[in-house]
Amino acid sequence: MSSDDKNRKLDKMDLAYATILGLAVVVSAWCGYQHELWSSALTFELKQANTAHRGFTTAELKEGQSTLIDAITFTGYIDAVSNHDQKLSDYYKNSFRPEMRAAFDAWIKTDPFNNTTAKTTPFDMPEYPLSSDSEKANSFLQLADEKSQNADKMSNTASNYVFFISMYASVSFLVGIGRVFASKKMQTVFLAMGAMVFSATTIVLFLTMPIFPGNISL
């Protein structure tokens, strides 16, 4: 083989090395960029989940307070009726919240003091609805669960991109260490190994990994 042929062969080998290394660096940097985007989105998703959970806790506390007020005023009404104190029973009855008053009026119509089949309290009546705070609590809880699930998915996606970065680092290692050997055969073997790992990793990457959508604002 002439020196010109050897030089051309070396030039092709160097070009192959440079191509694989360059592509590995570019795609690895792109994976790092995707990791940062998904990690940033994860932070905002967790923040929204925490905000929704705080909203759920606040709404649940308000709902509990409303139910407690209803229970206290109803207990006072029952005590006043038991003591035949009409003035005090009217006071408690007029103190009911609108939601409680609707259930109470429906309950009274069933003649609970004489009718053994009547509901025990107005709280058992269908007219005693879930408060707006209860509906808010449920919506906040649903939102918190949704955001938490999204955060888990984003966390897994960001972690998987780190795995692909490590795979491209192994490509760079294989291609780089191949240049250490004086044997052209060994250089070709490591170059082929690097090319195969790069190709397989890239195929799996673009077939399985979601790309950060542009419609998600950070």
Image (cartoon, rainbow, N blue to C red):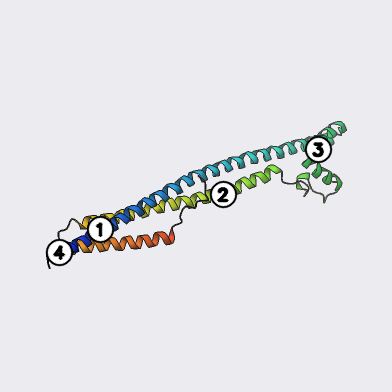
Where is mark 1, residue-wise?
17
Question: Mark 2 or mark 4, which has the lower sequence index?
Answer: 4
Where is mark 4, residue-wise?
4
Q: Residue at x 48, y 44 (%)?
A: 43
**Amino acid bearing label 2:** Asp
Where is mark 3, residue-wise?
78
Q: CA distance from mark 2 to mark 4?
A: 68 Å
**Amino acid bearing label 1:** Tyr
**Amino acid bearing label 3:** Ile
Q: Residues within 10 Å of mark 3 (few under 14, many from 20)?
A: some
Q: Residues within 10 Å of mark 4 (few under 14, many from 20)?
A: few
Q: CA distance from mark 4 to mark 1?
A: 20 Å
Left or right: 133 with respect to 173? right
Q: Are marks 4 and 1 in contact (CB under 8 Å)?
A: no
4 vs 3, front mark: 4
Q: Are marks 2 and 3 in contact (CB under 8 Å)?
A: no
**Amino acid bearing label 4:** Asp
Q: Secondary structure at mark 3?
A: helix
Label at residue 145 = 2
